[in-house]
Image: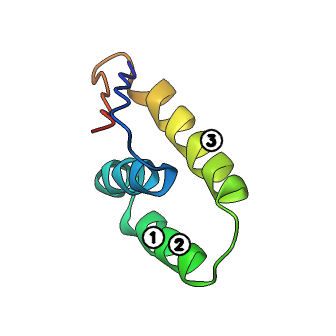
Amino acid sequence: MLKKKHWGTTMIQQMFIIVFCLEKIVGIELFFLFLFHYSEGRSPGRLSTFISSKFTVYQEQMSRTHPIYIVYV
């Protein structure tokens, strides 16, 4: 499951939260990819799509035994 709470956070802050959660789930390479992406000053669009697809795949694999919650704070 995916819970969202929007409390005036910026897109970058939300992306950091998502990537931090994914780093615990999928692997640390996503976190470094995120940092490199922003250090290069690129648009987050393609990276966001990539992360979403990774999360969706993992969520489908684990949904039977481990519900996943990502909370935007």
55 or 8: which is nearer to us?
8
The picture places residue 59, in percent across and down from the top left corner, at 45, 29
Mark 2 Cα-neighbour bin, 10 Å: few <14, some 14–19, many ≥20: few
Q: Which residue is mark 2?
A: 33
Q: Quadrant of the N terminus?
A: top left
Q: Which residue is mark 3?
A: 53
Residue 18 lies, with reference to residue 20, above or below; the image says above
Badge number at residue 29: 1
Left or right of 53, for residue 1: left
Q: Are marks 1 and 2 in contact (CB under 8 Å)?
A: yes
Instruction: Please identify, in this view, whether the residue under mark 1 or under mark 2 is nearer the observer.
Output: 2
Q: Secondary structure at mark 1?
A: helix
Q: Earlier in the sequence, mark 3 or mark 1?
A: 1
The picture places residue 70, in percent across and down from the top left corner, at 33, 34
Residue 20 lies, with reference to residue 72, above or below; the image says below
Q: CA distance from mark 1 to mark 2?
A: 6 Å
Q: CA distance from mark 3 to mark 1?
A: 15 Å
Q: Earlier in the sequence, mark 3 or mark 2?
A: 2
